[in-house]
Image (spheres, rainbow, N blue to C red):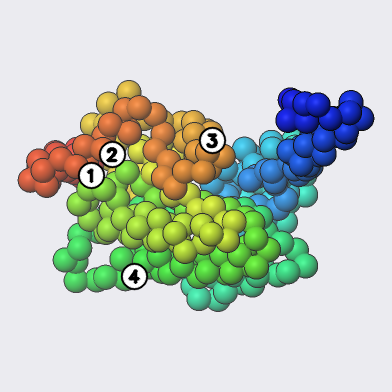
Amino acid sequence: MTRAAWTIGVAGAAGATAAAVAAARWARPTVEVAPARPVLHGQAMVTGGTSGIGLAFARALAERGCDLVLVARHGERLKKTAGQLSWRYGITVETLEADLATREGAAAAAERLADPDRPIEVLVNNAGKGVHVPLAAEDTSEHEASIDLMIRSVLILGAAAGGAMRARGHGAIINVASVAGLIPMGAYSAIKSWVDTYSESLAMELGGDGVQVLSVRPGWVRTEFHERAGIRTTSIPDFLWLDAERVVEDALADLDRGKIHSTSTLRFKVLAAAAAHAPRPLVRWATAKIKGGRS
């Protein structure tokens, strides 16, 4: 400090005292800052966690040390998957056999999410199914079941998790939407468009409370999803296919960065941007071409 110069002509002791006072005045107190809480920690619930993208999420979270709660319809497959994950990663895996397309199944998962004694720090809303039924079909039961599974249950579980996480001041919700939600490709696209918009809305609602929300927009991913839905995929070029592990890796990286949307790989980022911003007549034309190859 040079403030002692202000005391020219004053005894050296007085100058030293003035310097000490000045130093004390301008010194910054040392504050210990606690390390930031990692986004991925504690226990994670993954719906539809026995195959495809859900299983890839379960593995990735287990590798990061998260204990798991797996939710799925098929009990035997659920127990087998839980045993494999527990053995491979040395974690605790809890199972919940529930059909999330039913109110009872969604309520059971929501109850588990809201349990304050066993907090869930990460929710992955992944359970889903393909929809390959015309919108104008006389029988709308397939559409209704899809809405129950991929909209109603996402809403119910998101509300339960969001409320519990907000009360604790931390947590993360990952909703699996789709690039298909950006184009008009029938009921599945409409449902995933809702998931994407819902996720962004939930992120805005909970963002100030320490809760992160991420919408994942996969493209075409190599899983059993399309086969189970009876969707032909032979017209889709090989370079457009993604591995579930890559989608999940990019999603968790985007969650760490605090992003709200995650689209894996540059090629699908470009396709997503084109679908969102290109003239709608062009988007509809391109969509018709894609649908022609999937029929």
Q: CA distance from mark 2 to mark 1?
A: 6 Å
Q: Residue furthest left?
A: 281
* Amino acid type assigned to the residue bearing label 1 in the image: Ala
Which residue is label 2 attached to?
272
> Residue 239 occupies which quadrant of the picture?
top left
Which residue is label 3 attached to?
253
10 Å crowding of disc 2: few (<14), some (14-19), many (20+) = many
Q: CA distance from mark 3 to mark 1?
A: 23 Å
10 Å crowding of disc 1: few (<14), some (14-19), many (20+) = some
Q: Are marks 2 and 1 in contact (CB under 8 Å)?
A: yes
Q: Residue at x 29, y 46 (%)?
A: 180
Q: Are marks 4 and 1 in contact (CB under 8 Å)?
A: no
Q: CA distance from mark 3 to mark 2?
A: 19 Å
* Amino acid type assigned to the residue bearing label 2 in the image: Ala
Identify the element where label 1 is drawn.
helix
Identify the element where label 2 is drawn.
helix
Q: Are marks 3 and 2 in contact (CB under 8 Å)?
A: no
Which residue is label 4 attached to?
144
> Residue 171 occupies which quadrant of the picture?
bottom right
Is residue 104 something one can see in this rendering? yes
Coordinates of residue 279 in the picture (x, y in percent): 11, 43
10 Å crowding of disc 4: few (<14), some (14-19), many (20+) = few
Q: CA distance from mark 4 to mark 2?
A: 27 Å
Coordinates of residue 241 in the picture (x, y in percent): 36, 30
Which residue is label 1 attached to?
276
